[in-house]
Image (tube, rainbow, N blue to C red):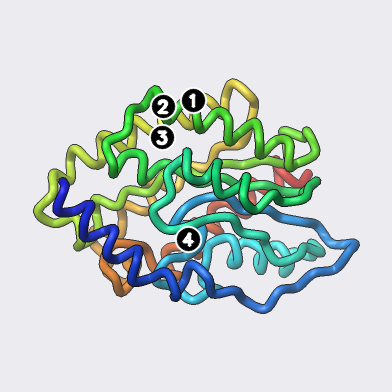
Amino acid sequence: MNWLWSILLLITACSTNQSNYMEPEIINQPSAYRYLALGDSYTIGESVAPEDRWSEILTDLLRKNNLNINSPEIIARTGWTTAELLEGIKDRNPKGPYNMVSLLIGVNNQYRGQSMERYRTEFHELLQQAIGYAGGNIQRVFVLSIPDWGVTPFAKGSNQAQIAAEIDAFNAIAKEECAKLSIVFIDITPLSRIAKDDLSLIAQDELHFSGKMYRLWAEKALPIIQQRVLK
């Protein structure tokens, strides 16, 4: 996997001036709902336009359902693990409270071969921080599961069955930690796996997912968020 990791670092470096720092037109109204999105490449939308990020699509869907909500404030970076997200949050020091906080993190923990015990500890800390940014309201926090990058063309030549098994194991930990705190957990991993047979769901870099896939995630999350997060 060392060669694969080196290639990913190269892709990350090359993309630094692309999706990591591209911001859509911000819609901010003092009276509107505030949304904080925490994560990695999947939240920042590596290799897709800003408006095709799943958090942006979700926000647009909520607006179409008559919710007055600002554009998401995003703290995410391609390649981030749980530890790096914790540092990123510390550096940004977002000012809560937020009406909604999302978390999607862990793929790089799996990719780098980090232990599940470490993931559990750091993921739990991230959940506690998310709750804090939601003003202590657990109901306002939700988690998306880790998608399976093993279905992408980039993963050909790797042990895709092992990747899938490890992703499932990390997701089991995330789901358990969410259950302990009664935090909404939305499983989008099965959706990510349909990209194996539909290349339109894959971004041009052949490693990340396309806006079409992110829309599927947002559409799945929408009714759950309406019923359980924003009720």
- Please provide percent x and percent y for residue 216: 47, 60
Q: Residue at x 38, y 48 (%)?
A: 147
For marks 4 and 3, give the CA distance: 19 Å
Q: Residue at x 51, y 71 (%)?
A: 52
Left or right, residue 217 beside residue 72? left
Disc 2, SS: helix
Q: Residues within 10 Å of mark 2 (few under 14, many from 20)?
A: few
Foreground tag (3 vs 1): 1
Residue tagged 1:
121
Q: Amino acid at mark 4?
A: Leu
Q: Residues within 10 Å of mark 4 (few under 14, many from 20)?
A: some
Disc 3, SS: helix
For marks 2 and 1, give the CA distance: 5 Å
Q: Are marks 2 and 1 in contact (CB under 8 Å)?
A: yes
Q: Up-down: is 89 above or below 61?
A: above
Taking the view exactly as shown, the residue that stands out farthest to the right is: 31
Disc 4, SS: helix
Tell which of 135 and 172 is nearer to you.
Answer: 135
Q: Residue at x 52, y 45 (%)?
A: 85
Tell which of 191 and 214 is nearer to you.
Answer: 214
Residue tagged 3:
171
Tell which of 46 and 160 is nearer to you.
Answer: 46
Q: Amino acid at mark 2?
A: Arg
Foreground tag (4 vs 2): 2
Q: Amino acid at mark 3?
A: Asn
Residue 118's label in the rendered image is 2
